[in-house]
Amino acid sequence: MSGTFVGMPAFPVAAREAVHDATLRGNLRHATHTIRAKRARAVGELSDWARLREAGRRIKDHTLRHLDRYLVQLEESVTAAGGTVHWAADAAEANRIVTALVKATGESEVVKVKSMATQEIGLNEALEAEGVRAYETDLAELIVQLGKDRPSHILVPAIHRNRGEIRDVFVREMGAWGRPAPEGLTDAPAELAEAARLHLREKFLRAKVGVCGANFMVAETGTLVVVESEGNGRMCLTLPETLIAVAGIEKVVPSWRDLEVFLQTLPRSSTAERMNPYTSTWTGTADEDGPRAFHLVLLDNGRTDALADRVGRQALRCIRCSACLNVCPVYERAGGHAYGSVYPGPIGAVLSPQLRGTASEIDASLPYASSLCGACYEVCPVAIDIPEVLVHLRERVAQGGPAVREGNRVVLRPARGHAAERAAMRAAGWVFARPRALRAGQRLASRTRRLHPRTLPGPGRAWSGARDLPAVPVEPFRDWWQRTRGGKDGGR
Ligand code: SF4
């Protein structure tokens, strides 16, 4: 398995394989059910949860509406505190900036804090291509990296692995990356954690460059915030001489007062804790302590396109808590890899097609990777109406296909694979507009109902392959109404 998601098949194809993997389904079911129950208890402790959720939604909406102002304020604050801000329009530019910054230090290795943004842009691979090795230091990311695997969950990237599999990865791979796994390592959690700690410690002490993301960036002081559970992030943020942060532009919040809301909702929604164990905040550089050089790379990579979409922009409120993944019946069965993105689950299904467009098969299929049950919306601490965005994106895929630039204008290409759906909708519209034709069709369907196939032919097979076709009644409803109500309202 490769480390990137490039060239993934459409969701239904990728998910089919995962659904038949009994071990994967067992791992996912156990993990998601455990986290979801704990989250419900942690959230239930707060009598003002609904108000906190609404406050989070408003703060994010306000910030997104005035993003230009807050980003400039953030840049000024970071610069005044001794940091340097870089602007990256896309993944390639962000990778170029980070690679150049690392090479300017003369170093050939970096330690990394868990960061979705750097996964999104494929930073590790870009650094590798330039002879720089990146070491993941978050335990789950370490498991993914050593196993040459891909993350499958926002918070617990190795959720698809059980303890026995993790032990095997450690024993097999650790030696090639540094300190080998201890002799006789078992799958006891404490032993696995100790093996990772020993393996990582020498990297922390040696590293001169650290790379991180940010959960939040406070515009008024230029402060970056990383919340984590293991303490590895704190090591990466304080020990290296140079610190490079890569963060999406939507991570900015105006003030510390705003931050306070999210520091309450994020831990309870993600790890079901009242307060996360490590909250690291730092502002620029200081002579006495921490990195001597600090760089912040502000990443767009499709975010301003999402911001321009009236319905879709709410996805930018996301604080990456992963609560929506843990309650999603589709994620629980298909797993994270099927989404073909570092952003799996319900949020991935609305974020990836907006950040990357819907030109590829996988991105065009993601808005359909949902039953629209609404559980994701119920648990989201910033009230993102994911079902609403999913339906909106389905409309975009079905009606427009990918947007492509032709000369000076952007045109919508017809969507592949949806011609049959559009033809069926046109036919239905024609029939519903003609009551006589509708009645004749219903009677014909009732009379021939024993001859109807159990599955639809042609492109309709994909629809009926996962559903039971509804049985056609012996008698159409209108005829039944007329017969039993004596024609009083039967003509309507
Ligand atoms: S969409 Fe909401 S529930 Fe899902 S990860 Fe983002 S903030 Fe959490």
Image (cartoon, rainbow, N blue to C red):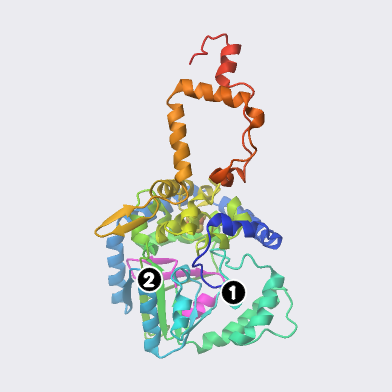
Rendered-image quadrant of the N terminus = bottom right
- As helix, strand or loop, the secondary structure at mark 2 comes to strand
- As helix, strand or loop, the secondary structure at mark 1 comes to helix
Magenta-tinted stretch: 213-238
Q: Position of residue 444 (x, y in %)?
A: 57, 24
Q: Which residue is mark 1?
A: 139
Q: Is residue 284 left or right of residue 168?
A: left
Determine crowd level at label 1: few under 14, some 14-19, many 20+ residues with C-alpha closer than 10 A.
Answer: many
The residue under the point 52% across, 69% down is 228
Q: Amino acid at mark 1?
A: Leu
Q: Which residue is mark 2?
A: 223
The residue under the point 40% across, 69% down is 247
Q: Position of residue 489 (x, y in %)?
A: 51, 12
Q: Position of residue 483 (x, y in %)?
A: 59, 12
Gap between marks 2 and 1 measured at Cα: 25 Å
Quick check: 444 above or below 98? above
